[in-house]
Amino acid sequence: MATDDGYLVATYEIDGHHDPFKKAKGIAIGLTVGTWTELPQEKQAELAPHLGKVVDITTVSATADQPAKAHIKIGYPVRNLTPDLPAILTTVFGKLSLDDNIRLLDLELPPQWEQHFPGPKLGIAGMRERLGVFDRPLLMSIFKQCIGLPLVDLEKGYRQQLAGGVDLIKDDEIFFQDEKAPVLERVRRFKALNLQREEETGQKAWYAVNVTGPSTTILDQARRVVEAGADVLLLNVYPYGLDILHRLAADDDIPVPVMAHPAFAGAIQGVDSPLLLGKLLRWAGADLVLYPSPYGSVALPRADALAIAAHLRSKSVHRPAFPGPAAGIHPGMVPVLLDDFGHDLLVNAGGGIHGHPQGAAAGGKAFRDAIEATVAGQSLDEAAQESAELQQALDQWGVVQA
Amino acid sequence: MATDDGYLVATYEIDGHHDPFKKAKGIAIGLTVGTWTELPQEKQAELAPHLGKVVDITTVSATADQPAKAHIKIGYPVRNLTPDLPAILTTVFGKLSLDDNIRLLDLELPPQWEQHFPGPKLGIAGMRERLGVFDRPLLMSIFKQCIGLPLVDLEKGYRQQLAGGVDLIKDDEIFFQDEKAPVLERVRRFKALNLQREEETGQKAWYAVNVTGPSTTILDQARRVVEAGADVLLLNVYPYGLDILHRLAADDDIPVPVMAHPAFAGAIQGVDSPLLLGKLLRWAGADLVLYPSPYGSVALPRADALAIAAHLRSKSVHRPAFPGPAAGIHPGMVPVLLDDFGHDLLVNAGGGIHGHPQGAAAGGKAFRDAIEATVAGQSLDEAAQESAELQQALDQWGVVQA
């Protein structure tokens, strides 16, 4: 019998009131074979391959701001569970999540389990190839208004955003009903507008459509919108559960990237953000991940925002995904943004495009000019001499110094 | 056009640093029509049915322990969304969950939307009828060990638990793999043991089997275990997402109750427990709900544990569900438990049954005797004169005074 066919390793932070050694041993036994020391020797031999193990314990001393803490790493034999995220979450943070003062910081898959998770369908290189954009971050615009508008209004808004040269335009994540603008109709019309722009300018564009409805029909819904021409699916991952993302990403009949929206993720405070919005979403198959930037009013700590991007793009058996740190981003922020996050990035703007004094088309153009200047090593002030739209944006929002 | 076709009302707690009036108005507009004051009058008329409204604002003064807070109630027109829990969570606590210092306290459905959610399939009365237990709380026992054991060991454990007179026996929520004890085989064998006991004693028993695997196949899996004879399905609701519970409960081919396990719910700290483990689970269709009792080491505040039970059993269009507050429960606690939670209750014990000095069968009997005595208004000490098993339990754990 194999003695080690792989462990799923979870790292937890527990507070200093626990004895970390006792706590760690309690988890390793309690969440695997249930009981150990009282078992007869032959039962121990039988159950040994199923027994969890304490991989590491690190105590963190108290500081003025923080009480003493410990980080404990527990290895769970993967033979105990099935290779899906509900089983993983239930095992490593099911009952344990209900403990006081314990947080799930990280998870590591054993090599033989990585293949069970699809990872991004296209990855950064695949999306760049399909979109024809190789040398700069992607630029995405978000509808300012969706709900209650007739299709003709949405089309008008779509045209304005397209005109500025954005690469993607996405639905609002709260856009569900479509009596006035049925989703398949939206996909067809916006696709036509994308193709029209491509014909006129050579630049492709993608519409990211929100896939919604019951979890029992969401894969069918995804296939229908893809058939109608959708280039990207937007998914509210945590309201559905990570496994729905996994199944969308693993479905060969859905050959388009999935963009993960962070809706509801802020409610899940017991799991560290880089795991929740970085690693888990990449395993489950998000190609593009939206999450709070460190700049806006809805802010993530800078270290967490960078760690999410690192998880999405690190060397791995899974293709890398585009990080899309959003909120508080305007053209004058582009140098800071690219300095912080690099060029394999989804620049994602709502107010920073629609709030341009000359409207959304000028807002998109200002962003594109800021991005191209920054990538070329040119200052924004210099670039603004050639771009009235960028100058207007800088007048409005200023330049944030890197 | 109808001006009011129903609002989904969400109650939030925000901290005192926000201006609650401004914040509430920002949510009501921002998470519905997106923009308002700058719209021309005819657009306002068109979008008015889609505009959110501020229903109530209550400020809570600072105390020595607590900073100032406000409770705000926002009404979202249900015409903006589809009647499913992912749409609800995304709308009311999608982006908003990422705000600092905001918690979702409560949700209220408009009457015309209640029918869109299945609620419990059988409800308390239906389960009592099917199980033939009318005049006392139900008693459930939890396997002490599952993982890695061959079916013959599990059967032995099942027999011992059955012998004590428990009504239900449940899988551990982390029991997924079944190489040694395939799930359909477990269901068939345990069902046979249930029927055997019924023949011998007249008392029915149910086995609650964990339904697991990909969310795309979990309904088929549920149908298969039901076909094999499963009486109750156990579901790790939050690792899957509430909508999977909804679809299991709404499926007519799955005519058995669903028991909700609180796995991972402790990670969702941004949502108040009575909503998360009470109201939402009842809407989605849980017939029995396990959650932390106020007595154990994994504890919920007493007020929250009682509020969960109240949500599960309150007057509603949906059938009531059994609350199953678990952890720290032994026979000597039964008077307190029934005093706190009433008789429409699932008494749920692991250590309190298996830890009995004479084993699990005696542990179950001690519980049954404690329950029957308490329901009959007899003291445990009195009842223990007729029950050696109860006396041994009281010697071991003591009597907790109500």
Image: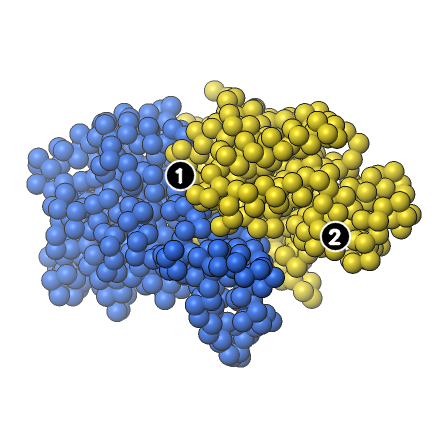
Chain colours: A yellow, B blue
Type of amino acid under label 2: Gln
- Give the residue at mark 2: A358
Amino acid type, label 1: Pro
The residue most toward the top is A1
Q: Looking at the image, which residue is at 44% across and 57% down?
A: B49
Displayed quadrant of residue A311: top right
Q: Which chain carries label 2?
A: A
Q: In this view, does A338 lie to the left or right of A55?
A: right
Marks 1/2: CA–CA distance: 41 Å
Indicate the position of residue B286 as horizontal and vertical percent values.
30, 47
Q: Mark 1 points at which residue?
A: A214
For disc 1, the neighbor class at 10 Å (few under 14, some 14 to 19, many from 20) is many
Can residue A11 be seen from the camera position used here?
Answer: no
Q: Nearer the viewer, residue A157 or A293?
A: A157
| Chain ID, mark 1 | A
| Residue B351 position in % (x across, y down) | 32, 49
Q: Nearer the viewer, mark 1 or mark 2?
A: 2
The N terminus of chain B sits in image quarter: bottom left
Question: At x 80% / y 49%, what residue is drawn?
Answer: A389
The residue that appears at 75% across and 30% down in the rendered structure is A201
User: Tag 2: Cα neighbours inside 10 Å, few (<14), some, or many (≥20)?
Assistant: few
